[in-house]
Image (spheres, rainbow, N blue to C red):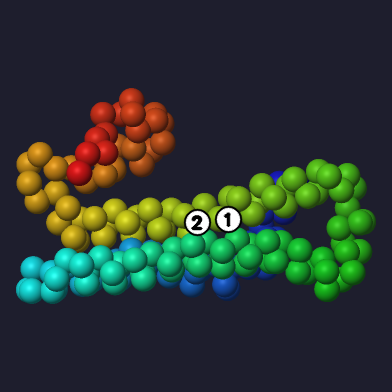
Amino acid sequence: MFRAILFTQWKWIRLALVPAALLSFLLPLLSVQDLAAVQDGLSPARFLEGHAQMGMLYPMLGAMLALLVATGAWAADHAGRHVYALTLPLARERLVLLRLGAGLVLLAIPLATLWIGCLLAAVAAAVADRPDQRIPTCWRCASCSRPWWRSGCSLRW
């Protein structure tokens, strides 16, 4: 039953979720775009001020994605006056939990693209230009088989 609900929610919100995932991938890359200007003479204070303004976009992106998935989960039912949801051979509580779980699975898509965008932005910004510095995550942690503190990854800057 979960697979069916996940598939129907994907059908309902895929046209909005794919551009949102693309936006969440590009946002970290756009935020480190001016890093080369610091080396060319831009003051670090102006650079940090610009990043503080870009930092406002991350919570806005999260709120937009949450509203998109939440409204997409119930929009078709609301348009049909909840007849479909009430005719399912399923308790209402279970339906709500299945829809919530499907929404969380669908939110993992833009979250993964945001994480990949952050990794590429960290590499593009040359965070690890000295041997004693490390990128804040490593590819071994991507499998999620072990927590980061047991996998040998370092979060030092």
Q: Nearer the viewer, residue 17 or 149?
A: 149
- Mark 2 touching mark 1, by CB under 8 A? yes
Q: On the rendered structure, is 121 left or right of 43?
A: right
Q: Nearer the viewer, residue 156 or 28?
A: 156
Q: Secondary structure at mark 2?
A: helix
User: Whole-percent x and y of residue 52?
Assistant: 34, 66
Residue at figure coordinates x 91%, y 64% from the top left:
83
Give the quarter of the figure containing the C terminus.
top left
Residue at figure coordinates x 89%, y 69% from the top left:
81
Task: Residue 109: give its label.
Answer: 2
The picture quadrant where one finds residue 85 is bottom right
Q: Residue furthest top?
A: 150
Q: Is residue 5 above or below residue 50?
A: above
Task: Residue 106: give its label.
Answer: 1
The crowding category of the residue bearing disc 1, from other C-alpha atoms within 10 Å (few below 14, some 14 to 19, many at least 20), is: many
User: Whole-percent x and y of residue 100?
Assistant: 69, 50
Task: Residue 31: give its label.
Answer: none
Q: Nearer the viewer, residue 53 or 112?
A: 53
User: Whole-percent x and y of residue 106?
Assistant: 58, 55
Q: Is residue 136 above or below residue 52?
A: above
Q: Amino acid at mark 2?
A: Ile
Residue at figure coordinates x 20%, y 55% from the top left:
123
Residue at figure coordinates x 81%, y 43% from the top left:
94
How far separated are the C-alphas under marks 2 and 1? 6 Å
Q: On the rendered structure, is 106 left or right of 86?
A: left
Q: Amino acid at mark 1?
A: Leu
| Residue 127 shows in the view | yes
User: Whole-percent x and y of residue 144?
Assistant: 41, 36
